[in-house]
Structure formats: C-alpha cells, structure tokens
Image (spheres, rainbow, N blue to C red):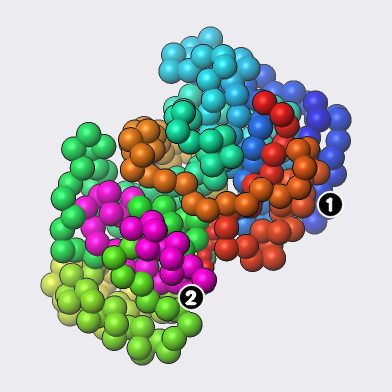
Amino acid sequence: MKGIKVDQVGGDYQVTNDLPKPSPDSNQLLVKSIFGAVNPVDELMRKTGLLITSWPWTPCCDVAGTIVEVGSGVTKFKVGDQVFGCQGVGFLGAGGAAEYCLFSEDIAFKKPDHISLAEAATMGVGNQTAALGLWSGLNIALPDPQNLPAVSDEWVLVLGGGGSVGGYAVQLSKLSGYKVIASVSGRSISAALAHGADETVDYQTPVDEQIAKIKEITKGKLHRIIDTTSYNANFVKQVLQEIKDDAGEKYFASVNDWEDFGPLPGDAKFYPISLGPLGRPEATELNEALSKYVAVIESLIDAGKVKPSKYTIVGETGFESFIEAVKVQSGGSAKKVVAKLQEE
Ligand SMILES: NC(=O)c1ccc[n+]([C@@H]2O[C@H](COP(=O)([O-])OP(=O)(O)OC[C@H]3O[C@@H](n4cnc5c(N)ncnc54)[C@H](OP(=O)(O)O)[C@@H]3O)[C@@H](O)[C@H]2O)c1
C-alpha cells in the first residue's frame, strides 16, 4: 500500500507504494487514514529510532479515518464508523501516514458528528497524554462524565497550558473539579484561557515574579503541577520549594519521562508520563488505564465539553503533505499541524 516510510535511524521520509497492508486481529480495526496530525515525537523517532521496533517505520500517531474492516471480536464499532486517536508508535500497523493503519477497539475514540475528521486528528495524543498526567499522576479522581464534580478551590499548575498536551491538561483539570493556572508565553494566553484556564503566568517574565504570582493566586491550595513542555523541572522544583510547608501531599507529573529528578522538595511524588508503549501487548497497565480514560474523554467530547485545539492544514491532499506538515511543526507552530492524507 501507499504511505510514508523511513528506512533507518536518521533516514529521510519517502513516499512509497511498497508498505505491507496490515491485517486486524480479533479486537482490532483496519482504518483508512484520512487526516494525520504531527506530534514532536514523529521527528524525535525519526532522528533517534526511539520506540521503533519495526523498520521501515511509518510516522504519524494522531490519525482520524474510516473503518474498512473489523476483527472478529469487535463489538463497539462497525465498518464505516469514523475513529481517531493514538494507537501506539513504532510497530507494524501503527503508523497513520499510510493508506491503512490499525486501531484497537479499546483505545479508539469514536468520532461524533459535531467534530470534523480534521479536528479529530488533533485530539488523540494530547488528550491521552494529559489524561495520564492528571488521572494516573496527580492523584486526580477520574470524573464521571454524567455527573461532573463542582470546581473546588484546589489548583493545578499546567506548564505549557497553551500547547496541545497542555491545552487538554487545562480542559481535563477543569472537568475534574480543579482551578487552573497555566504557564504560557504571550502568543498562547488566549488559547489557555479558551481552554478554560482561570489564570495565566507568563514564563518569559522573571522566575521570582512568576512564583510570587503563583503563590498569590493559589494561596496554599496548589498541590498538583504538570509539565507538558518537558524542560521545566528546575522551575517546578523552585515552586515546590516555596510551597513545601503548605499542608497536603504534593504531586508533579511531567512528559519528561527519561530524566531522574531526584528527591523533590516537600517529598512531592513524581509521575513520568509515558504514552510511548501504548498498544504494545506487554504494556497491560498502560493499555488498561487508557481504555478507561478514552471512554471518559469520548463522552466528554460527545457532550461538547472537551473541544479541539486550533489547527492548521498544510499542503494538498496526499502523503507528501505530511512531510511538509512535519517541517511546519518542527519550526515551532503555535497550532496543531494537520495533513489531509487521502480523500474520504
Ligand atoms: N512523554 C510522553 O508520553 C509524551 C506524550 C506526548 C507529548 N510529549 C512531549 O510533550 C511536549 C509537548 O507536546 P505538545 O504536542 O503539547 O507540543 P506543543 O503543542 O508544541 O506545545 C508545547 C508548548 O510548550 C510551551 N513552552 C515552551 N517553553 C515553555 C516554558 N519554558 N514554559 C512553559 N511553556 C513552554 C509552548 O508554549 P507557548 O505557546 O505558550 O510559548 C508550547 O505551546 C513535547 O516535548 C512532546 O514530545 C510527551
């Protein structure tokens, strides 16, 4: 089948006709990829080979498309349904930048009518990563979508609250009953507020000023911090140092899952967010957690309570446009970058 391949670590993206067409197992769906969104991990994987267990490798882990075949045990979906989300990375059938890719019934989001397929392609990795950070990492209770909790006076600090993962961390924190202070630069203040942040702090202002503002706003009710940028651990340590004597356990989750930050001030509990092994048979705990989280987020999206981030579509319809989209994303786009891979 047609799609994009990379032959080796550091190799170029090539459009090719010789990819093997995957075949769904009993609980899998074969999906025709229509829109694909770029994530920072695409370039990271190409450059380092990280998480790639099957070569040639096909990029794109945020995909939306139409089911063309279902495995014998599938009950939730049928041929013709439209689905989206991240199903894993680096193994055969996972790459979305191909005519067809595989979804698992348990971690596929069903696309509701009020969300376009292009929007849907932007909503997988961000939501799934934020969900792990909050519900697995920050000791935040998984909300009942039919009976959402009232917002309490407890705060979550979201570093990168204007980005993709950060935007969903803001939305899901609010829906879980927390107030949110988002750390952003000027270009993303409006995005963070649109996601529901109660307050913002500008990470380009002096650190002392940021911490003073955070303390003044949260008034001893900050126990949970999520870094969705991956390089703010030192800042988090300084915040924790300042709030360490406030009553209550402190929690810190970060998308930086490769560094050992050592003991944290106030004995804060650290959770490294790691979506990468998703979909692999050995990642049972992660797969089970995500299947619960996907069900909750799917209901919240259906009800219009979780909304897509701003995005931009790059290029013409075709797999070449994904390669173009990767370049745009690598240049530092403030919006999610999407490519239309094929006609519906
Ligand atoms: N570990 C995992 O499982 C996992 C999963 C998914 C993603 N990730 C990683 O998570 C990171 C974010 O991914 P994404 O898709 O959300 O990227 P994104 O949409 O590009 O967002 C990144 C955000 O970081 C913000 N930022 C940059 N420097 C900052 C600072 N010093 N303080 C606060 N915010 C800062 C930018 O904010 P402004 O626009 O406000 O300047 C930008 O919006 C990437 O490194 C990605 O590789 C990891």
Q: Which of 226 and 99 is in front in this view?
A: 99
Image location (x, y in percent) of residue 118? 59, 39
Is 241 situated left or right of 186 in this image? Answer: left
Residue visible at 39% across and 58% down in the picture = 194
Residue visible at 28% across and 54% down in the picture = 174
How packed is label 1: few (under 14 Cα within 10 Å), some, or many (20 or more)?
some
Is 10 situated left or right of 138 in this image? Answer: right
Image location (x, y in percent) of residue 40? 62, 57
The residue pinned by badge 2 equals 186
Label 1 sits on what residue type? Answer: Asp
The residue pinned by badge 1 equals 12
Residue visible at 71% across and 50% down in the picture = 314
Q: Tell me: residue 306, above or below residue 268.
A: above
* Magenta part of the chain: 172-196
* Count of numbered marks: 2
Q: In which quarter of the image is the N terminus?
A: top right
* Residue at the top extreme of this rendering: 72
Label 2 sits on what residue type? Answer: Gly
State the mark number for residue 182: none
Instruction: Find residue 76 and report its image quarter.
Output: top left
Ligand 1 contact, mark 2 (Cβ < 8 Å)? yes
Q: Quadrant of the C terminus?
A: top right
Image location (x, y in percent) of residue 69? 61, 15
Is 222 situated left or right of 77 in this image? Answer: left
Residue visible at 48% across and 75% down in the picture = 186
Q: Tell me: residue 247, above or below residue 288.
A: below
